[in-house]
Amino acid sequence: MDIERKIELICRPPTEEVVTPEDLRALLEKEEHPIAYNGWEPSGLAHLGTGVICAYKMKDFAEAGIHFKAFLATWHAWLNNKLGGDRELIRKAADLFRHSWLALGVPGDKVEFIYSDELYKDIDYWAKTVKIAKELTIARTTRTLEIAGRKEGEAHYVSDYLYTPMQVADIFEMNVKMCQLGMDQRKANMVGREIGEKIGYWKPVCIHHHLLQGLAKPAVWPIPEGQEREAIASAKMSKSKPDTCIFIYDTPEEIKQKMSKAFCPEKTVKYNPIMDICRYIIFREKPVFTIERPAKFGGTVAFESFQALEGAYTEGKLHPMDLKNGVAAELGKILEPVRCYFENNKEAKDCLEVVRQAKITR
């Protein structure tokens, strides 16, 4: 595969930022199969963001011939007291994530799943962590707390400050040349770029993907100019708010019920979570999005691009409820293979039941 096609796949939406395009090209000219990774705290059920959006990028990178490592950060989840700090339950949630991506079509023979329980047995990993910590001030580390879902004033334990040096050490321990994580993990990746060469490693390329919005109305609406990034980060889809996110295991009925209550401002596309799903999922899955509606409301309508949908919605030619019904119907079809996988795979089904019964924390 030529470099142009690789870059096209790597930068394909939901990719939102590449730091830097020049470094990406230089890396691909030097290495045919560089290592990329994404990492997740296994802390509950997979929703559209954790599941579908992340699966898209894993498949893009695998198609581009990149060696992709899916890092299941069980220790980070434990540090962050996810699932009550129950390490056995966290491990079960990690298994659930792995099954979830396989159910979504991630090629198990091209993506390597790595558990931090195994990686951290090597003393060299901890040497890297200390080396990185020695380069970080308390103030600099405090500014990265967003990666653990915390605000700057919410660090109360020494372990909170271990999170960033450990995450950066993951990059160099796994020989990662491309960090492919969500926009909320940007600050840790930039630390890796800033200090990598200084401590004898390299400057990784950072490829960040879009964060899907949750279905609830943002805490402040309309979103004030200049506060967009912070507002959307706090409004991202979260498993700790089950009524405001679509889980990939949800039935068509559950999806429709959640959609019916979702925030979907009329004639507004920007920061509209339903349009967000259309842009990054519906039109990724199919070239034409068809919405069925009664003849008295205009009849069935089809859109051949997101831009066409955007225009019709902005002009008021499509009612929010019709949009929500159409999206719910499509998501039901898109997630059908996931439901079949979990119904027919005993190990996956058992993982799902265990995690469903657990108390999900922030």
Image (tube, rainbow, N blue to C red):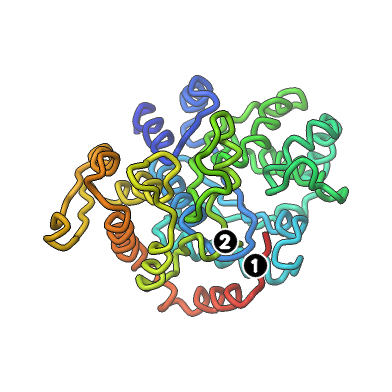
Front residue (pair 36, 86): 86
Relative horizontal placement of residue 293, taking residue 102 as reference (left or right): left
Residue labelled with disc 2: 239
Residue beneath the point at 58% across and 43% down: 233
Q: Indicate which disc, 1 or 2, sits on the residue closer to the N terminus.
A: 2
Q: Is disc 1 placed on a helix, strand or loop?
A: loop
Q: Position of residue 217 (x, y in %)?
A: 50, 52
Q: What's the amino acid at mark 2?
A: Lys
Q: Is residue 111 above or below residue 226?
A: below
Q: Is residue 243 above or below residue 155?
A: below
Q: Is residue 183 above or below residue 78?
A: above
Residue 61: % across, % down: 44, 42
Question: Looking at the picture, how far across and down is residue 162, in whole percent?
Answer: 81, 45
Q: Residue at x 36, y 73 (%)?
A: 253
Quadrant (top left, top right, bottom left, bottom right) of the C terminus? bottom right
- Whether residue 348 sits left or right of residue 85 in the image: it is left
Q: Callout 2: 10 Å neighbours few (<14), some, many (20+)?
A: many
**Tag 1: Cα neighbours inside 10 Å, few (<14), some, or many (≥20)?**
some
> For the point 85% across and 34% down, which residue is it?
138
Q: CA distance from mark 1 to mark 2?
A: 8 Å
- The residue pinned by badge 1 equals 360
Q: Using the rendered image of the protein, determine whether residue 36 is visible from the camera's viewpoint.
A: no
Q: Secondary structure at mark 2?
A: loop
Identified at 48% across, 23% down, the residue is 21
**Quarter holding residue 181:** top right
The kind of residue on which mark 1 rests is Ile
Please tell me which residue lies in front, 119 or 216: 216
Asked whether the residues under the numbered discs 1 and 2 touch, taking CB atoms below 8 Å apart as contact, a structural biologist would say yes
Instruction: Give the percent coordinates (x, y) of residue 183.
Output: 56, 39
Q: Nearer the viewer, residue 258 or 18?
A: 258
Q: Is residue 268 visible?
A: yes
If the image is split into quadrants, where does the N terminus sit? top left
